[in-house]
Image: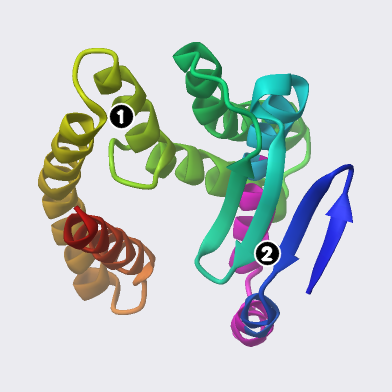
Amino acid sequence: MSFRLKGCIVEINFFFFAVVAAASLGDTNGVLLCGILAAAVHEAGHLCVMLNIKELAPRKIKISPVGIKIIAGGSSEDSRYWCLAALAGVGANLLFSLALLLPSLYFKSEVITKLILSNLLLAGVNILPAHSLDGGQLLKLLLKGRMSESGAETVLLIVSAVMLIPVLTLGVIILIKSQYNYSLLALSLWLVMIVFHSYLKK
């Protein structure tokens, strides 16, 4: 499924709907819905910055079960623009959480609390210096100012691998102790696969 939105092609993979629908059946406490909303806020942050910087105008948006990929159509070499775009998603999640903070003090709503936590968790995960995360993209941009792109990619892969070891370990510990919470472990394994795939492409 694809359509055009203000000159940008939006592609939505069929399996995205299938995975969301299947997961929703077991989402009795609304955690998945809060997570999807947090992801939408995050990507909206990236889009807002890219749409307002001509050099970064998005050409295509791909939505699949593994995430949302925004492909820029511009050709800017200014790392400041790209750093701003990389940080925009995390910033949007933090601002959204801050905006919900006041209502949460007056309305003791479990939904609001879950929305705040979902946005804070997504911001915290994305700022990690791992491949394909915003923190990883930011690190690569900073490294490219001091070394070649291939060198920056190599350093990023090493940092990602080292960083993922404690995260993966923590995911296993949480799964064993809770006996049901596999979220962090699943995220860690997904990141490990991405790092391994990126290593094979080098």
Answer with left or right where residue 103 lies relative to residue 183: right
Q: Is residue 83 above or below residue 125?
A: above
Q: Secondary structure at mark 1?
A: helix
Q: CA distance from mark 2 to mark 1?
A: 32 Å
Residue marked by disc 2: 33
Query: Which numbered disc, 2 or 1, marks the residue that appears first in the sequence?
Result: 2
The three-letter amino acid code for the residue at tag 1 is: Lys
- In this view, which residue lies farthest toward the front? 75
Q: Residue at x 35, y 62 (%)?
A: 187
Q: Is residue 145 above or below residue 154?
A: above
Residue marked by disc 1: 140
On-image quarter of the N terminus: bottom right
- Is residue 168 covered in magenta? no
Nearer to me, 118 or 53: 53
Q: x%, y% of residue 173?
A: 17, 65
Nearer to me, 100 or 5: 5
Q: x%, y% of residue 169?
A: 13, 59
Number of other residues with Cα within 10 Å of mark 2, as a class: few under 14, some 14 to 19, many 20 or more: some
Q: x%, y% of residue 123?
A: 48, 38
- Coloration mode: rainbow
Residue 156 is at least partly visible in this image? yes
The three-letter amino acid code for the residue at tag 2 is: Leu
- Is residue 23 covered in magenta? yes
Q: Secondary structure at mark 2?
A: helix
- Residue 94, located in which quarter of the rendered image? top right
Mark 2 and mark 1 residues within 8 Å of each other at the beta carbon: no
Nearer to me, 100 or 143: 143
* Residue range highlighted in magenta: 19-41
